[in-house]
Image: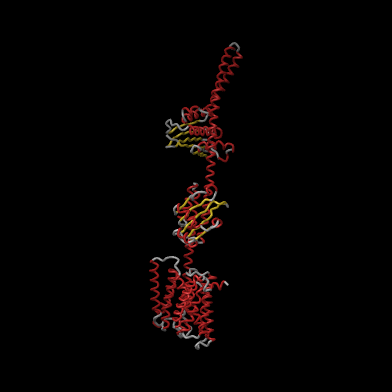
Amino acid sequence: MKIKKSFGVFKSGLKGLPLTVFQILCLAVVYHLAARLGLKLAYEQVNTSPVWPPTGIGLAALLLFGLKLWPGITAGVLIGSLVNGAPLLLSLGMALGNTLGSLICAYFLKKIIKFHNTIDRVQDVLGLTLFAVVSTSISATIGTSTLLLLNQTGGAGFGTIWLTWWVGDLLGALVIGPALLVWLTPAPQRMNIWAYLEGFLVLAFITVISWYVFSFRPSSGILHQSLFFLIFPVLIWAALRLGQRGATICIGSVSVIAILGTIRGVGPLTAGSLNDSLVLLQTFTGVLAFTSLILAASTIERRKTSKDLKQRVHDLAALNDSSSLFLRNFDVKSIFQIICELAVDKIGLDGVWIEIEAGERRAGPPPAVYGLDMDAVPELKHAWEQNMNCRERSDIMIRTADMLPEAAAISVGNFQLYASLPLAFDGEPIGFLKMLSREKYFFTGERLQLIQSYANLAAVAIKNTWLYEQVQHGSRQLQALSQRLFKAHEEERLHLSRELHDESGQLLAALAVQMGLLKKDAAGNETLGKKINTLIETSNELQEKLHELAVNLRPASLYHLGLMNALQQHAGVFSRQHNIQVEFEAVGMDDLRLPIEMETALFRVVQEAMTNISLHAQATRIDVLISRNDHLVAVILEDNGVGFHLQDVPAGNHLGLFGMRERIEMLGGTFTIEREIGKGTTVRAEGPCHD
């Protein structure tokens, strides 16, 4: 049933009937004229010619316009045979053979080889040659058998007629057919002026050589005989450099000149009868045709493979560049715009926008558009997606302009292709990547794979930015909580400092006064006086300790005199208490006061770092530097201790380092530690400052 439908004249229905009939009539006329030309070279039998262009014409017509034109071949053979005086039965037999041969060859080329009319693959050449040999053998067998049954052989033997018929048909299929196919099929790419100039020179050169070779008898000299072989390298050059068009036109030129020379009995291929000479010539032409076609096809395949490889490299580079940009960008607003811009600039689309279908972002206009106006998006979307159900909209969708109603096709302007790819991450829908192109066939198989890979990368990038946004939001909340915690901590320190200084200090002072009065009352009791003196000394020592503790909790100098003076005072006290040399230096401070939060944070970092040095570093010297540079203030501590590895620090002690870093970073500063075993540790804290 499939074969009948493919061969049916009315396959396309009544709508295309007038055009089909016109094409059949044109083919019949052209086939008839070519048959009359071929029969002028019928020397062995009046209906059998070794030069038969109609076979190539019929085969090319079926491949170019469809198998439905087969009646044109039948009509052309019947007209040609009857005009030539052949009986009706003979005409019908030859029509059957010629029609069946072309049909078989064209059908199996389309069905099995998936034949390209540009003959740009080696399998096209091999398939054409194989099925041409088989189909012309069938045609020659039917035609010769018909001549034999009707006693129309004209005295020639079956083998001679069959060989002549077969060679003529085969060379028509291998010489005329490919030439018509490649020249009537639009070229895959335009040639520049230099290619045309090269083609003209090659054609002129091979024409001159062929004219010289086939215009003189073989006995004219060794130069003439040697030039015969020059045809081969020129044809090879044409095939390798100019492709199938260059090869077929050069073969056609050689064939015409060779036939004209051979029928006049001149040239290197004249042997025996004229029919034998033409058979020999056609064999020579067939070898030239097959060699040139196979070389041109292999060259085209190699170039196409090289081009595809370069395109794949370009596509991978585009994906790599896109991935790098996606990884470097964590801004939600800009990531959408980057996705659209890269789709146009790197992949070659003409217009792109993104629609979000996840959560609260579902409503509103597209977050990014590139290549067209934002205002045009609703109209374009309505035109391309009308008459579509929800399921179609949720899947991968590709539509061309000719699939739209007439009104919608007008509203989409010069865009010829629309595609919608879902964006999803781990099965979770994110949205859609909407794409427009002015090329109708933009989405080839390879390019669609590239777009899908790009859409997957885009989905990951969008999801990453959303997750990063959530992390940043959580981090900001955590920093705000930490800031409130540190503030509460400082307030508690202030409260304790005041309690120790005011309440406890006053009580101890009152106790000291009372002890002094008690000492006067016990002036005559030496033993009691000594005990009272001991209590007074203990009270004074306790008062000093409480004062020191109050200062450490909340140094008054930090709030009254500033960070530089507070650090200098703390360095002196620390040096006396721990017997460690502390060198303090201030550069560019000029009595600069910072916000109290920044001064407190920097002071606590120095305080915590010096405490850690006294406990763990085994250092004998600490250098403290506070400096100002432009809008930054930095505090640097260096010691000559033993250093440490972070992984060697007990887990509980990490909180001190974390607290120092957290204090500085929440105020927009930076905190770094440089350490090396045996060479000490450097702590650096920087924060913003303004005049």
In the rendered image, the quadrant that contains the C terminus is: top left
Whether residue 44 is visible, yes or no, is no
Residue 420, position as x, y percentages in the image: 51, 56
Q: Nearer the viewer, residue 688 or 280?
A: 688
Residue 68, position as x, y percentages in the image: 51, 73
Whether residue 74 is visible, yes or no, is yes
Above-or-below relation of 214 to 515: below
Specify the color scheme: secondary structure
Residue 624, position as x, y percentages in the image: 48, 33
Q: Nearer the viewer, residue 256 or 226?
A: 256
Q: Which residue is farthest top?
A: 524
Marker count (numbered): 0
Above-or-below relation of 366 to 514: below
Residue 241, position as x, y percentages in the image: 43, 68
Above-or-below relation of 672 to 29: above
Side (left or right) of 518 relative to 167 = right
In the rendered image, the quadrant that contains the N terminus is: bottom right
Q: Nearer the viewer, residue 435 or 199?
A: 435
Side (left or right) of 616 relative to 247 = right
Above-or-below relation of 373 to 61: above
**Residue 190 image-quadrant placement:** bottom left
